[in-house]
Image (cartoon, coloured by chain):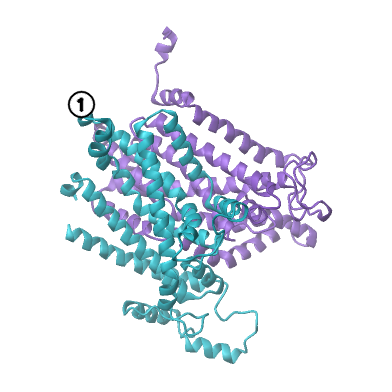
Amino acid sequence: MIRQILNRLGQGLLVLFVLFTLTFFLVRLLPTGPFKTERAIPEHIQAKMEAYYGLDQPLLVQYQRRLTNLVSGDLGSSLRLEGREVGEIIRQSFPVSLQLGLVAIMLAIAIGVPLGILAAWRKNSLIDYGAMALAMVGICIPSFVIGPLLADQFGRRLEVLPAMGWNPFSPVYWLLPAFTLGLISAAYLSRLTRAGMLETLNQDFVRTARAKGVGEARILFRHCLRGGLIPAVAYIGPAFAAVISGSLVIESIFAIPGLGTHFIKAMETGDEPVITGVVLLYGSLITLANIATDLLGLWLNPRLRTTG
Amino acid sequence: MTPTELEKGTSLWHDAALRLRKNHAAMTGVVVLAIVFLSCLVLPSIPGLLQDPNAQALDLKNRPPSGEHWFGTDHLGRDIFSRVLYGGRISIAVGIITTAVSVTIGVCWGALAGYAGGRADDAMMRVVDILYALPFLVIVILLGKALDPITADLTNGAVDLFAGEGATVAEQNDTRTWVEPITTLVPLFIAIGALSWLTVSRIVRAQVQNVGKQEFIEAARSLGLGHARILFRHILPNALGPIIVYTTLTIPGIMLFEATLSFLGLGVKPPNSSWGILIEEGANRMASNPWLLFFPSLFFASTLFALNFLGDGLRDALDPKSSKD
């Protein structure tokens, strides 16, 4: 078990290395650069600035230097925002994105899982069709249509919720963006929960339980829930990845000062250290979420433990 | 059952077709897809039927839907009906090309890994695991920006090639309008296809492993058939069901992805349109001109609905054992 976790962590490090290399060389291909501004900078000053940041060195030397710095935990400092370290930028904006993402995932679970259980419990009824149609809406209508619609309706017409902005201490600001962000995951979770519950409800032990006269609610929640949730739990890792990508879009719709906003800005200016820092952070989060998902799966499904 | 029906017998595919035809949601999907695809492919090809999607008429700007402009006009007086149909061509083409790339790579990779087994399988699946952990959208945004200068060169080269030497500026611009969407999108979406084959490869690998254990494969091997023949003629056809299902479900995913990229300002460049761009433009002017958001979203969402329902229907029809996810 512990060996398995260590193995996965080692693989995670490999992922980060691949990510760093990919980002490093892709950024060099960007047409924009931190010093390629509209204002013409005199050549000797540009050369000095590039020398200061080590950008005049051969590519492989730069690569090696960045890599050794990264290994020792130094993410470097922003090329665009003078004197600001990448670590500091991340410390400031990541909590916002993390909060948004966690609220979105919790909303997705709170909506998707009960909907799936309900649909499986009343299979082929109006409830089932309604719930699955709703899930299809969540999958097919992109967040950048739903987001502005909700912001317009609740924010500007009804004026019950703020249409944009962020306040970490006031849940009314979280509701619209987190709902929009979590919707697609909620849709997939409800489909997976329904499928898992249906499969478990078809098992022999459920028939035995019914024959013994166990009540429906007890069958559903005591006997079937744990087994029926396995496919949904396996989806939490991918859902986390979906939320991370989605937050780039959501943050720009609702004007939230999170990591995604910084990433888009850094992309526009070719600010390599910031881009690399954000990409590596996302990569580590996804890796950790995948490991956590596997562990949860093992806990729910003891049959996996012996084979793994 | 009549005797002739009995004589014919029912193949697996025939069975599946019967099951699919009973699925109302999937059949509605087929009809909707046929309507959308045909109108996007055929109507713009009929000369003189639609207005030029990029022609501006500033005296006709921001008109609501009418007999003249069925879907209204935008802030530059461009006809939304024709922009939606022309944009649809791009969105559909992107969905199909990218899916083709992704499914081809995924099927080959998964089949080879599943058939080879052992160390090679371990190594190939390790690559899949690593790629799975990449933050996909972020990498694609980077890739899209990095490809920009390359696609610009490609566009200029293609314009010179097709407009011919000594073409006037107007002729060059005409050529550019249809060349540019292709040259800017194809490299990006081939790259996306090349990154999104992971799930297909896992599905195919599992299928190939299952089929490969069966006795008729053993029989084929004892007859002395080569590896390539066994893999492509005997194993893969048996894995076709899940591949078809997955392909149908990948197209809407890729179309959604294209729309997201367009929304973030990557992908198709104005004045050309795709459904993603039209939706983005519509979302910005939603309060005053709701038709700008409504019609592109309607086409986009119904295509996605139709493809997803068809994919679900195909899954139930081709692979009755597997459950919906």
Query: Where is residue A50 drawn, in percent x and y?
Result: 51, 86
A303 displayed left or right of B42 = left
B306 displayed left or right of B71 = left
Count of picture labels: 1
Q: Secondary structure at mark 1?
A: loop
Q: In percent of the image, x 40 and y 48: which residue is there?
A: B106
Residue A278 or B62: which is nearer the viewer?
Answer: B62
User: Outermost residue, top direction?
Assistant: B3
- Chain letter for the cyan part: A
Q: Tag 1: Cα neighbours inside 10 Å, few (<14), some, or many (≥20)?
A: few
- The quarter of the picture where the C terminus of chain B appears is top left
Residue B198, placed above or below residue A78? above
Query: Where is residue B223 drawn, in percent x and y?
Result: 26, 33
Q: Colour of chain B?
A: purple
In this figure, which residue is indicated by the disc labeled 1? A213
User: Outermost residue, right direction?
Assistant: B59
**The quarter of the displayed image where residue B168 is located:** bottom right
Residue A162, placed above or below residue B7? below
Residue A94 or B214: which is nearer the viewer?
Answer: A94
- The quarter of the picture where the N terminus of chain B appears is top left
Residue B254 or B195: which is nearer the viewer?
Answer: B254
Q: In percent of the image, x 51 and y 59: which residue is there?
A: A250
Residue B26, placed above or below residue B99? above
Residue A75, placed above or below residue B46? below
Amino acid carrying label 1: it is: Gly
Query: Where is residue A96 drawn, in percent x and y?
Result: 44, 66
Query: Where is residue B53 drawn, in percent x and y?
Result: 73, 49
Residue B108 seen in the current view: no
Q: In the rendered structure, the residue with mark 1 lies on which chain?
A: A
Residue A211 seen in the current view: yes
